[in-house]
Amino acid sequence: MEDDRTSVYSAADGGVSPTQQASSANSIGDKGEEWALKHQVEHTRARDEQSGLPPRELGVTWDNLTVQVIGADAAIHENYLSQHNFPKLIKESRNKPPLRTILDNSYGCVKPGEMLLVLGRPGSGCTTLLSLLANRRAGYKSVTGDVHYGSMDPKEAEQYRGQIVINTEEELFFPDLTVGQTMDFATKLKAPFRLPQGVTSAEELRQQTRDFLLKSMGITHTHGTKVGNEYVRGVSGGERKRVSIIECLATNGSVYCWDNSTRGLDAST
């Protein structure tokens, strides 16, 4: 487990925590209804199992994971003059820049099919832990410890970046593309080599996947609307967050890391 500033919770019951199960059960019981797409999900799962295409699952373990970065007081934006200020460079070379430890001897295990919840105050290292578990190590001064994805170490797992994915807190899109174009691109990148039974072409499967993802988030009406950003007018902030979520789900990955994925969403979502 991480230091005392960050706590970790793991649930093995189908990747759903007991709190989520109780909340879902109460919601269904009160309204007397179930998710409209439940039968479609069950049909797709049964079809894939009959076709010999089981869901992809991968466990993650880490031990003695320590991450250090250069302190904010030593991290400055270089310019031409600062890079050629030789007296200052000589003086600084004698003193090592101050380092800040973000994670200190963190350890844990997430078995295939499990869900892990990381809780912590801002600055406690939650995003850093998720980034490391998603094998995103750029930008850190020092990363020590062991992280394994099944039997693979981080170097071996680099060739499977499409299977170990992270949904970042800030959405990253081409704002001039529409929601439909964005999802078309995401689903085209993940066309399987083997097609399930009853599917005639990869294009048919891609369209089914795209339409299901858009419908699951209730944003089919945004198909022709630009994604947009703070400068380009497009969908609302909550709808943009939903596009970010289903774009990540379209990867059909083995390990998903979600960094504050509920920010900006309404309660009904």
Image (cartoon, rainbow, N blue to C red):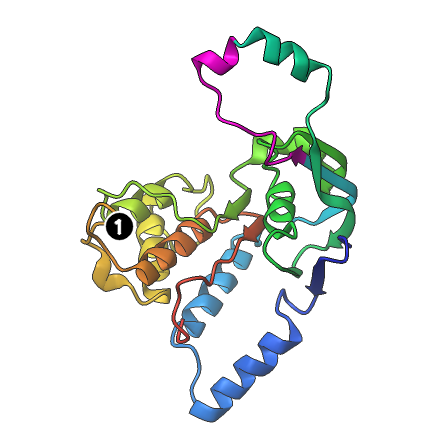
Would you name the residue on which mark 1 appears?
Answer: 227
Q: Residue at x 67, y 28 (%)?
A: 155
Q: What secondary structure do most residues of the magenta stretch adopt?
A: loop
Helix or strand or loop: what does disc 1 sit on? loop
Q: Name the amino acid type tagged 1.
A: Val
Q: Is residue 197 magenta?
A: no
Quadrant for residue 19, please give it.
Answer: bottom right
258 or 260: nearer the viewer? 260
Q: Residue at x 21, y 63 (%)?
A: 221
99 or 219: nearer the viewer? 99
In the rendered image, residue 152, in percent from the top left (x then y), is placed at 71, 36
Q: Which residues are magenta?
A: 69-84
Q: Is residue 17 above or below residue 131?
A: below
In the rendered image, residue 95, in percent from the top left (x then y), is placed at 73, 20
161 or 106: nearer the viewer? 106
Quadrant for residue 161, please give it.
Answer: top right
